[in-house]
């Protein structure tokens, strides 16, 4: 374990923690522009977090200790996930402990705790949100796993940094299977991050909301952690997408300080484009009825399975 | 220690001790203090001892013995090898926790008296142990039938209730249909030598078609006991009917004896399996996994939900076995070893976590008298011990890292990633799709567990009576704690567990995992930097980040908390009935998997004075397979009924006619 590897690991964690709210702010700003609204400040998510951390926490009388632990677990899971995904360099010391399957498991852990916390208060909103979230989750999770499987089959490993390194250093790799899985991944990203067309991050209309229904009872520091965790989740998903589909620019191999430094502006550029793309997709599509969400996710799952079949047919 | 020269005799002595403890129950059958507080803890100690002996004997050489018991000329053969040891270990560990729990669980008012129940319970344990040690077909079948009968009597403990008698009958029926399959399989495997010792079967050279017949018959027989679809119908009936410790024992341990049997026949008695045999357990296993978990998601009875979840897990185990047979058959032996280790690991995991969950439901059932999820809720406040320990089981069952359920599923998925290298073109493309189904069933399992835990323990109590619920007693807590600790040990020490299971696989199929140099805390199943996982490091990272964020948030800001009523949108009048019921939580699954389920709904009309909504989810396989089959049997029985005249003279005539026919055939 060389010092530069530890620096890469630490830098990735700090970058994820610091930049996740900014990325969210950027997506919101692009959305506002596209919808001819006056855009909120890029720094609004930070101010919201600051405000929330200073407030007094109000907790429902029926809450159990699980309700108070859950925000920390969800936040912790997202931070650990950020440590697994190679967003800047592929030599990450922690990734021996968790491969891509463990990453999917970690995201599932966060989801289960979020859903359990939502059920803890015992209001109609919480259980409704938990049920819908688990419905989205059980379809999105295998789809994401299939996406990762295709990339694993191409690279003969399930270690995410090794996959990225393999895909980034090949001279010219054209994989039709990755095209299918990229579509699947985009659909999963939209669904898992409570984006239109599955959920609307700006809504508080009870009939349509999923994520907001689950965190309805949270306030102050607990809400801040939940909000930060969901910003981190979006950031993580974007970075998983980069690691699998646009791995270029990540510091690979010897991992020199120069390469690491060069990867930072590239990551920023990728995030800028991805955020704008996400806002565009959200603006162009309409919210689906909740009953239609399974169809949307089944499409994602089938796209991923199709990608797997294409990979096997063409012999990779 | 001279006794350690022969762990086999120690194991047999412990099984005999179980039998004696059972018989001791008859001395003072009505005395709950004697039976529950003395005999059951003794039985638990026996379980611990068995686990220690079996665990230590794992790496020892196999040993066989002939017991001078049984019929003349038919002595009982017993043998202990690594495969027996690992399942004896499972039996010992799981039964220790369950027996301690049972010591605090059984109370007055059950149908069967405590002493008789103690006999049945310990006979059940001892017969399961004997199944694992048997080395000839007779001993195996005697132990197998003792196991089936003793568990039948345990299921029908509350035999005054007609539904329970019906569930018991269904269980007994399918157990015997399965036993016929096993018996026929042994009949084929003796291969004309008429020697029914396992040693003779190992050396019988069967034609390929007969070997395949024997394998499929065994799969049918053991599949019936394991609850593979379509022979699963008894599970969701028998598990809710039985007292909770018995459900835990049946689901956690007895289903594993079927896994043991399938492995014994498939890998040991039949020699090296053909690759295509594996496709049968693989396909049936995958179907069972999906079918079981979908039905689990729509159940409203907590024990029935767990029973369906057992079907799912058995499906995952058989998927691993099938994959292992395919790999071994085509000569990819180290991958075969990996898949087999995944199956064995999942068996161990399931034994502990399902027992834990069943005992958790038992504690809830005792303190509330309610099995229906729709009448529970909010018990985490009243029963924190049971709730938090059950949460461990529920998270493990959901296959979430860093708990143990994840490890076995991870291993299975890793072995699926190689399935495209199987040198049979169509099959090699279909196999990786199995990974998609495993992923789907794992994700659905998380759905089921959120429903199970959330509806029972979280939220507000749905009935006013729940306010009187009390936490489990000391012995019950101890049982739950033991099983939860077992789950955590299996989570954090995967490398050691896999090392031990590697011995089993090496003895069973001769295959080994390639040796990889890795530190003790890092799990690297295959060389070449393909994948690694470290549960301890993972847990430390997660716990570290959580602790750090708690410390930072509390340190930098403040820790003020105000309690207030839950948000009611300003309308007021929120009550506990507005939470999702179990039916409500399963609604998306009913919607998405409508094709698998036979859903009957009664919707209220707008003119009803007392509007009622009822939904019943039926099993299509019951309708499509069992109802016609039952009708057919009934018609045949009706047609033959004229034989029954009820006069002794007629029956004597039948005997006479039979003798005449036999004589004619003989001469």
Image: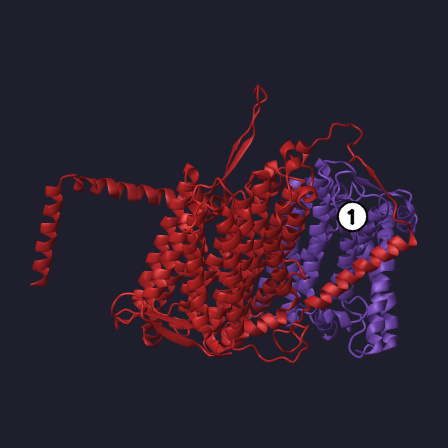
Chain colours: A purple, B red
Percent of width and height locating residue A11: 86, 67
Image side of residue B29 versus residue B575, left or right: left
Regarding mark 1 in the picture, which secondary structure is present there? helix
Q: Nearer the viewer, residue B289 or B125?
A: B125
Quadrant (top left/top right/bottom left/bottom right) for the C terminus of chain B = bottom left
Q: Is residue B401 above or below residue B27?
A: below
Q: Is residue B255 left or right of residue A150?
A: left
Which residue is at a point 48% across and 70% down the rendered structure image? Answer: B85
Task: Judge from the rendering whether residue B146 lies leftward or rightward of residue B352; answer left or right.
Answer: left
Q: For residue B123, what is the image quadrant?
A: bottom left
Residue B37 in picture, x, y percent from top left? 53, 51
Q: Are there few (<14), some (14-19), or many (20+) residues within 10 Å of tag 1?
A: some
- Please, which chain is the residue tagged with disc 1 on? A
Give the image quarter of residue B433: bottom right
The location of residue B375, given as percent across then percent down, is: 60, 36
Kindly identify the residue that appears in the image at 84 percent across and 77 percent down.
A3
* Relative depth, front residue between B180 and A41: B180
Let me know if residue B483 appears in the view.
yes
Q: Which residue is mark 1?
A: A68
């Amino acid at each position: 374990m060389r010092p530069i590897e530890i620096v890469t690991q630490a830098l990735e964690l700090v970058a994820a923690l610091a930049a996740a709210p900014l990325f969210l702010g950027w997506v919101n700003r692009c959305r506002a522009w596209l919808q001819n609204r006056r855009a909120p400040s890029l720094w609004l998510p930070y101010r919201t977090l600051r405000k929330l951390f200073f407030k007094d926490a109000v907790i429902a009388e029926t809450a159990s200790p699980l309700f108070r632990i859950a925000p920390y677990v969800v936040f912790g899971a997202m931070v650990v996930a950020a440590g697994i995904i190679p967003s800047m360099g592929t030599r990450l010391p922690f990734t021996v402990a968790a491969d891509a399957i463990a990453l999917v498991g970690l995201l599932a852990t966060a989801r289960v705790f979020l859903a359990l916390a939502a059920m803890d208060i015992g209001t109609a909103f919480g259980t409704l949100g938990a049920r819908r979230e688990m419905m989205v989750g059980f379809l999105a999770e295998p789809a994401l796993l299939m996406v990762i499987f295709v990339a694993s089959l191409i690279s003969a490993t399930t270690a995410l940094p090794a996959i990225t390194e393999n895909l980034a250093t090949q001279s010219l790799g054209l994989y039709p299977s990755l095209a299918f899985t990229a579509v699947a991944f985009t659909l999963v990203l939209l669904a898992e991050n409570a984006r239109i067309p599955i959920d609307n991050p700006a809504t508080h209309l009870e009939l349509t909301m999923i994520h907001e229904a689950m965190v309805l009872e949270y306030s102050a520091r607990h809400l801040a952690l939940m909000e930060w965790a969901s910003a981190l989740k979006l950031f993580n998903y974007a970075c998983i997408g980069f690691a699998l589909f646009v791995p270029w620019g990540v510091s690979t191999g010897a991992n020199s300080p120069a390469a690491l430094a060069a990867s930072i502006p590239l990551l920023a550029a990728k995030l800028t484009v991805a955020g704008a793309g996400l806002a565009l997709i959200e603006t162009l599509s309409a919210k689906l009825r909740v009953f239609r969400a399974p169809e949307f996710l089944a499409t994602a799952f089938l796209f991923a399975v199709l990608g797997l079949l294409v990979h096997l047919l063409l012999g990779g | 220690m001279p006794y350690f020269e022969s762990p086999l005799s120690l194991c047999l002595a412990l099984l005999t001790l179980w039998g004696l403890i059972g018989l001791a129950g008859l001395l003072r059958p009505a005395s709950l203090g004697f039976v529950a507080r003395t005999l059951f803890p003794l039985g638990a100690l026996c379980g611990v001892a068995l686990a220690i002996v079996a665990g230590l004997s794992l790496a020892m050489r196999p040993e066989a013995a002939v017991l001078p018991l049984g019929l003349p000329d038919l002595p009982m053969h017993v043998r202990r090898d690594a495969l027996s040891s690992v399942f004896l270990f499972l039996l010992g560990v799981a039964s220790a926790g369950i027996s301690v729990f049972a010591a605090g669980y059984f109370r007055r008012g059950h149908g069967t008296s405590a002493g008789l129940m103690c006999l049945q319970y310990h006979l059940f344990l001892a017969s399961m142990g004997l199944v694992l040690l048997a080395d000839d077909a007779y001993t195996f079948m005697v132990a197998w039938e003792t196991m089936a009968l003793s568990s039948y009597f345990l299921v029908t403990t509350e035999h005054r209730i007609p539904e329970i008698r019906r569930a018991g009958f269904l269980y007994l029926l399918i157990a015997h249909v399965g036993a016929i399959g096993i018996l026929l399989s042994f009949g084929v495997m003796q291969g004309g030598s008429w020697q029914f010792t396992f040693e003779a079967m190992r050396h019988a050279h069967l034609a390929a078609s007969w070997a395949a017949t024997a394998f499929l018959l065994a799969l049918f027989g053991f599949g019936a006991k394991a609850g593979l679809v379509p022979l699963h119908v008894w599970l969701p009936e028998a598990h809710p009917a039985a007292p909770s410790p018995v459900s835990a024992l049946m689901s956690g341990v007895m289903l594993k004896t079927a896994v043991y049997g399938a492995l014994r026949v498939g890998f040991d008695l039949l020699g090296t399996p053909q690759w295509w045999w594996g496709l049968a357990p693989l396909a049936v296993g995958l179907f069972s996994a999906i079918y079981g978990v979908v039905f689990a998601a729509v159940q409203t009875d907590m024990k029935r939900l767990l029973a369906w979840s057992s079907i799912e897990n058995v499906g995952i185990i058989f998927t691993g076995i099938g994959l292992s047979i395919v790999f071994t058959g085509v000569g990819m032996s180290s991958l075969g070893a990996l898949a087999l280790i995944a199956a064995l690991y999942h068996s161990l995991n399931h034994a502990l976590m399902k027992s834990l969950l069943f005992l958790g439901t038992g504690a809830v059932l005792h303190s509330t008298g309610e099995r229906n999820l729709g009448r529970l809720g909010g018990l985490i406040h009243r029963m924190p011990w049971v709730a938090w320990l059950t949460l461990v089981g529920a998270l493990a069952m959901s296959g979430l890292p860093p708990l143990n359920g994840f490890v076995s599923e991870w291993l299975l998925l890793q072995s699926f990633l190689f399935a495209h290298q199987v040198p049979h073109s169509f099959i090699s493309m279909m196999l990786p799709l199995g990974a998609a189904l495993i992923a789907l069933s794992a994700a659905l399992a998380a759905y089921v567990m959120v429903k199970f835990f959330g509806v029972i323990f979280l939220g507000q109590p749905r009935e006013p009576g729940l306010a009187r619920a009390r936490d489990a007693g000391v012995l019950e807590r101890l049982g739950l704690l033991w099983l939860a600790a077992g789950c955590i040990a299996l989570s954090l020490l995967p490398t050691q567990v896999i090392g031990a299971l590697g011995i089993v696989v090496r003895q069973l199929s001769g295959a080994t995992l390639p040796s990889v140099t890795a530190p003790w805390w890092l799990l690297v199943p295959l060389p070449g930097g393909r994948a690694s996982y470290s549960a301890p490091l993972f847990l430390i990272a997660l716990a570290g980040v959580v602790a750090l964020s708690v410390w930072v948030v509390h340190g930098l800001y403040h820790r003020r908390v105000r309690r207030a009523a839950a948000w009611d949108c300003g309308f007021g009048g929120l009550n506990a009935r507005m939470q999702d019921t179990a039916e409500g939580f399963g609604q998306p699954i009913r919607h998405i998997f409508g094709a698998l389920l036979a859903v009957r709904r009664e919707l209220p009309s707008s003119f009803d004075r007392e509007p009622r909504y009822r939904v019943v989810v039926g099993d299509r396989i019951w309708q499509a397979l069992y109802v016609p089959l039952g009708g057919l049997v009934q018609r045949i029985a009706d047609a033959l009924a004229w034989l029954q005249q009820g006069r002794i003279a007629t029956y004597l005539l039948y005997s006479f006619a039979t003798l005449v026919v036999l004589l004619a055939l003989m001469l």
